Image (tube, rainbow, N blue to C red):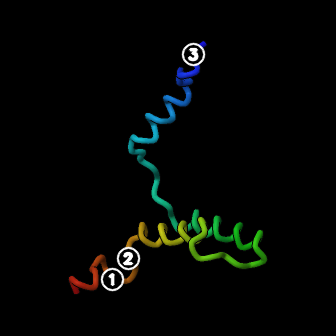
Amino acid sequence: MCIDTIHPIESTMKNSASQSVRSTPMNQSDAARIQSATARVNQGTVSSGSFAARAQSAAAKAAPARGTGGATPSSR
């Protein structure tokens, strides 16, 4: 057996990593669940930059603006 041979799984992983993957956007309910679980484990704290904090930020960005009737600050 040749040492230079790449295992098929490793080859697949390299190929899939370079391809874009479509995913479902984070929503407020998912982010709240993640943040709650993180806070429970960490005595009530959620560090900035943690996965829970990033999930909350992504959910806020994915959510439609509330109370503006769809208007953005620059279009009002």
Verify CB contact (< 8 Å) between mark 1 and mark 2. yes
Screen quadrant of the C terminus: bottom left
Specify few, some or many for label 1: CA neighbours under 10 Å numbering under 14, 14-19, or 20 or more.
Answer: few
**Looking at this view, is 25 or 45 the one in front?**
45
Q: Amino acid at mark 1?
A: Thr
> In this picture, is 74 found above or below 16?
below
Q: Nearer the viewer, mark 3 or mark 2?
A: 3
Which label belongs to residue 68?
A: 1
Query: What is the residue that sits farthest to the left in this orientation?
Result: 75
Q: Amino acid at mark 3?
A: Cys
> In this picture, is 62 found above or below 43?
above
Q: Secondary structure at mark 2?
A: loop
Which label belongs to residue 2?
A: 3
Q: Nearer the viewer, mark 3 or mark 1?
A: 3
Q: For residue 40, which quarter of the picture? A: bottom right
Q: Secondary structure at mark 3?
A: loop
**Label 3 – label 2 distance at C-alpha:** 58 Å
The percent coordinates of residue 42 (x first, y second) are 75, 73
**Label 3 – label 1 distance at C-alpha:** 64 Å
In the picture, measured across the screen, residue 38 lies left or right of residue 11, that is: right
Give the residue at mark 2. 65
